[in-house]
Amino acid sequence: MRPEQRMLEDIEREVDYTRSLLGKDALDARVMAALKDVPRHAFVPEEQRDAAYDNGPLPIGHGQTISQPYIVALMTDLLAPEPDDVILEIGTGSGYQAAVLSRLVWQVYSLEIIESLATSARERLARLGYANVEVRAGDGYHGWPGHAPFDGIVVTAAAPAIPEPLIEQLKPGARLVIPIGRPDGDQKLMLVEKTIDGRVEKRSVLGVAFVPLTRPGVRPGES
């Protein structure tokens, strides 16, 4: 069995195990196809490539990780992406989540606080042909006002509370997927929806473990 197929089967088993929390028996087939299409081994360090398709997170340097494939698939599914969407990602990392999203939407804008990671992700995505992803080094807490409002926002690091600028940069009817919690405490993956009339609805999906959202001059876990 090819490693990509094994990864997909691992994701399907995990979805089946957590279906009572997710409220669904399967993820969107388009999302699963995107994960199959994106070569995960190209987004992990050379020394981690034997484990690239295992269903677990892997270190990518600077205290950061590439997320577990199941979590990448779930967060992408929760966004409910459409082909004409413009999506904001906070926390580029190695670029893997952005690459998956790029297969499903019109444009991905991605912010990474660690400049060297932003540079390497930008170069990697360009080299692999993901032309509809733009990466910038910057503080993701404030979003990317110049390209707002967005059809969806995904945050790949845990914040102690939902950043208000990200809510403001959501289009009516759009979704924000974000882990909330402190580094040394419980974290929950949250689905936040801005209704057509501007109300904000929140749902806790399941427990997760993410690296903290990093901000200049702010200790991890502080607002």
Image (cartoon, rainbow, N blue to C red):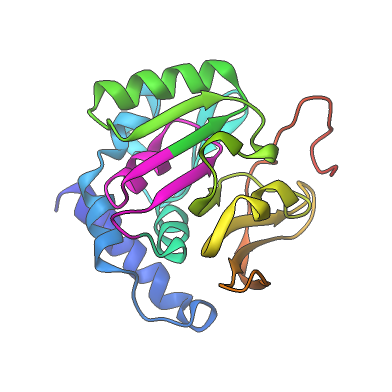
Residue 102 picture quarter? top left
Q: How many marks?
A: 0
Q: Where is residue 133 in the image (x, y as percent from the top left)?
A: 36, 34
Residue 91 shown in magenta: yes
Query: Measured along the vertical axis of the image, is residue 61 above or below residue 92?
Result: above
Which residue occupies 79% across, 49% down? 184
Q: Position of residue 12 (x, y in %)?
A: 32, 68
Camera-nearest residue between 81 and 38:
81
Q: In the current view of this chain or complex, which residue is farthest to the left? A: 1
Residue 131 shown in magenta: no
Which residue occupies 51% across, 63% down? 174
Which residue occupies 50% across, 44% down? 88
Q: Position of residue 152 (x, y in %)?
A: 49, 55
Q: In the current view of this chain or complex, which residue is farthest to the front? A: 197
Query: Measured along the vertical axis of the image, is residue 48 above or below residue 152?
Result: above
Magenta residues, as a range?
A: 82-108
Q: Position of residue 32 (x, y in %)?
A: 27, 60
Residue 47 picture quarter? top left
Camera-nearest residue between 147 and 191:
147
Going by the image, does 179 lie left or right of 7?
right
Query: Measured along the vertical axis of the image, is residue 82 above or below residue 122?
Result: below
> Is any part of residue 36 visible from this angle?
yes
Going by the image, does 131 lie left or right of 184?
left
Query: Measured along the vertical axis of the image, is residue 147 above or below residue 164?
Result: above
The C terminus: image quadrant: top right
Which residue occupies 31% across, 69% down? 28
Residue 70 picture quarter? bottom left
> Is any part of residue 163 visible from this angle?
no
